[in-house]
Image: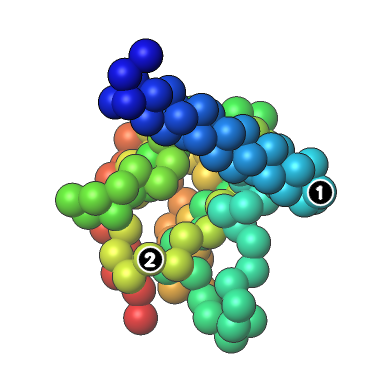
Amino acid sequence: MSLARLALVVLAVAGVAALLVVGGRALFASLSTRAPQPEHQRASAAPPSAAQVPTVRIECVADTCPLVTVRVPGGDVLQYRDMGRGEEVSYFEPELDVVLADAGTVRVTENGTLRAHGKPGAREAFTVKGR
């Protein structure tokens, strides 16, 4: 076996050992942390400053609220799904685009102010800017 092949084998074994150590530490860390919260609870968790008001807060007031979409304009989609009765989400980004497939099924609060309730079955799209 040439010296180059031997060096390559040693390097491969060291790489596999490093991957095993990193994987083992990650597994141990994931087992020792608390269980993750469901998505709707994570999104509506209170911000670090209790005085901060969400840019938009959406609460489902029907059995099912079809397709509620919230996204940062020109950026990430934060929510694209149906919601269930009593479920609520809050977002604190400076500007958000909101699309409601059925505006009559949700209660929307913009910067702490209740938005006029939409018509049942009507699609509604609007932009909210934070204060």
- Which quadrant would the N terminus be assigned to in this image? top left
Instruction: List x then y, in percent, for residue 29.
Output: 72, 48
Nearer-the-camera pick, 54 or 32: 32
- Which quadrant would the C terminus be assigned to in this image? bottom left
Instruction: List x then y, in percent, for residue 96.
Output: 31, 58
Q: Left or right: where does residue 32 sit relative to residue 111?
A: right
Instruction: List x then y, in percent, for residue 56.
Output: 45, 62
Amino acid at pointer 1: Ser
Residue tagged 1: 32
Q: Is 33 drawn above or below residue 14 in the view shown?
A: below
Q: Helix, strand or loop at disc 2? A: loop
Q: Is 70 drawn above or below residue 44 in the view shown?
A: above
Residue 93, label in figure: 2
Amino acid at pointer 2: Glu
User: Between marks 2 and 1, how big is the CA–CA gap?
Assistant: 31 Å
For the view shown, which residue lies furthest in the left direction? 74
